[in-house]
Image (tube, helix red, strand yellow):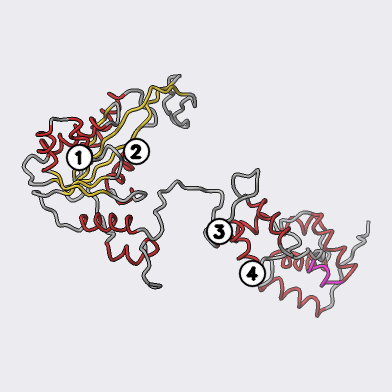
């Protein structure tokens, strides 16, 4: 049966198609179509062309039909794609408005902004006819903004002399060189929940992670005291049932009489918790004993809302990451902490504190009272 869609090329057309097919500078689709036309023009059948070029016979037939309908250019270029409506992009002002909106309080009924919620609100508040969540996401990513995230943070007061004098006092303490007769020791404490499994966990095996039931049982709480000597590469961790004045006093007495019995003074840095005071020593011991321990101490308090200045908090953060998720009693917790303490002490893990008073006056200038207008 005679072929309906004959391909007949002039010498000039054959040269142009041969050049296109051999240079490899155009898209792969155009090169394939050019080769189909060249083979079809010398009488090769659709199955032969399809096999030689590793394409479907339907592709060969389409190229033939387009050649008959519009010539070699139409066959090579293919079917023109319909023009897609161009998506509206935000200009500089639009991006600024979006960032301001993302930093604002979300509307009632929403805990935080989402990409789609921001897109809908931007359409209502501006002349943008339509905006996708993807576009919003790109703008937020460029501005390193994630309005759906929230960190709990101790926010320092603005322009507070009380805050900055405590801060600079602690920073100057951290600048002191190592002196075994006057060791700088930071102290902090952290409550923990004691949790047990309601069902026995299943250990991991090849191809299967460890599994544990999401349900757990609460077994009360415990408290972790932490003392760390950043320049001495030493720390001590102690578990107590409570976090009372008496527990604090006993922990400080142990530091003074055991670890630092030969020191002239223990330079103690701690936060402003109501139990962290020499008054706790007087509640726990006779006045003569409380006075003896107090005279061995040089106390420096971190400012309120400035717990990041306590290196013991950094140590407790490391300890928290190494603790098991569920520890069901204080004895087991103490064993875990003893292993962590020994491991870090043997590895001589210290704290290399770099932040200085001069840097604080530049980077945290907003925290200092201003004298420019006085």
Image spot of residue 171 (x, y percent): 25, 57
Dot 1, crowdedness within 10 Å: few (<14), some or many (≥20)? Answer: some
Callout 2–callout 4 Cβ contact below 8 Å = no
What is the number of the mark on residue 141? 3
Residue interval drawn in magenta? 71-78
Q: Going from the N terminus, do you reach mark 3 or mark 2 first?
A: 3
Which marked residue is nearer to the observer: mark 3 or mark 1?
A: 1
Q: Secondary structure at mark 2?
A: helix
Could you tell me which residue is drawn at 59 percent across and 55 percent down?
A: 104
CB-based contact (under 8 Å), mark 4 and mark 1: no
Q: Please tell me how crowded label 2 is: few (under 14), some (14-19), or many (20+) other residues with Cα within 10 Å.
A: some
- 4 or 1: mark nearer the eye: 1
How far apart in space, not on screen, are marks 3 and 1 (Cα)?
50 Å
Dividing the picture into quadrants, the one containing residue 320 is: top left
Q: Dot 3 surroundings within 10 Å: few (below 14), some, or many (20 or more)?
A: few
Q: Would residue 164 appear left or right of 115 to someone viewing this image?
A: left
- Reading the image, the residue beneath label 1 is 278
Query: What secondary structure is found at the residue carrying circle 3?
Result: helix
């Amino acid at each position: 049966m005679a072929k309906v869609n004959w391909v007949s090329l002039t010498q000039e057309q054959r040269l142009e198609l041969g050049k296109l097919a051999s240079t490899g500078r155009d898209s792969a689709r155009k090169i394939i179509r050019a080769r189909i036309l060249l083979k079809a023009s010398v009488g090769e059948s659709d199955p032969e062309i399809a096999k030689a070029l590793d394409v479907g016979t339907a592709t060969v037939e389409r190229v033939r039909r387009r050649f008959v309908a519009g010539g070699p250019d139409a066959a090579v270029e293919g079917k023109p794609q319909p023009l897609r409506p161009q998506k509206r992009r935000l200009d500089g002002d639009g991006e600024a408005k979006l960032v301001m909106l993302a930093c604002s309080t979300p509307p009632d009924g929403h805990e935080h902004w989402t990409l789609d919620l921001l897109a809908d609100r931007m359409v209502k508040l501006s002349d943008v006819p339509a905006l996708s969540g993807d576009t919003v996401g790109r703008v937020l990513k460029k501005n390193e903004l994630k309005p759906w995230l929230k960190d709990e943070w101790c926010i320092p007061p603005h322009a507070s002399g009380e805050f900055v004098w405590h801060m600079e006092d602690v920073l100057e303490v951290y600048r002191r060189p190592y002196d075994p007769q006057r060791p700088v020791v930071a102290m902090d404490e952290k409550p923990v929940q004691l949790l047990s499994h309601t069902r026995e966990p299943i250990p991991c095996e090849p191809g299967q992670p460890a599994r544990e039931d999401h349900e757990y049982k609460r077994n009360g709480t415990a408290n972790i005291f932490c003392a760390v000597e950043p320049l001495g590469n030493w720390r001590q961790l102690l578990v107590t049932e409570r976090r009372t004045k008496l527990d604090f006093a006993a922990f400080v007495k142990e530091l003074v009489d055991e670890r630092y019995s030969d020191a002239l003074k223990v330079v103690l840095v701690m936060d402003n918790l109501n139990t962290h005071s020499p008054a706790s020593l007087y509640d726990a011991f006779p006045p003569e004993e409380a006075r003896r321990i107090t005279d061995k101490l040089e106390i420096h308090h971190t400012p309120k809302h400035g717990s990041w200045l306590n290196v013991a908090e950094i140590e407790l953060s490391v300890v928290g990451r190494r603790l098991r998720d569920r520890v069901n009693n204080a004895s087991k917790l103490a064993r875990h902490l003893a292993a962590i303490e020994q491991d870090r002490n043997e590895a001589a893990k210290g704290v290399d504190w770099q932040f200085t008073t001069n840097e604080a006056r530049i980077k945290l200038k907003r925290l200092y009272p201003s004298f420019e207008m006085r």
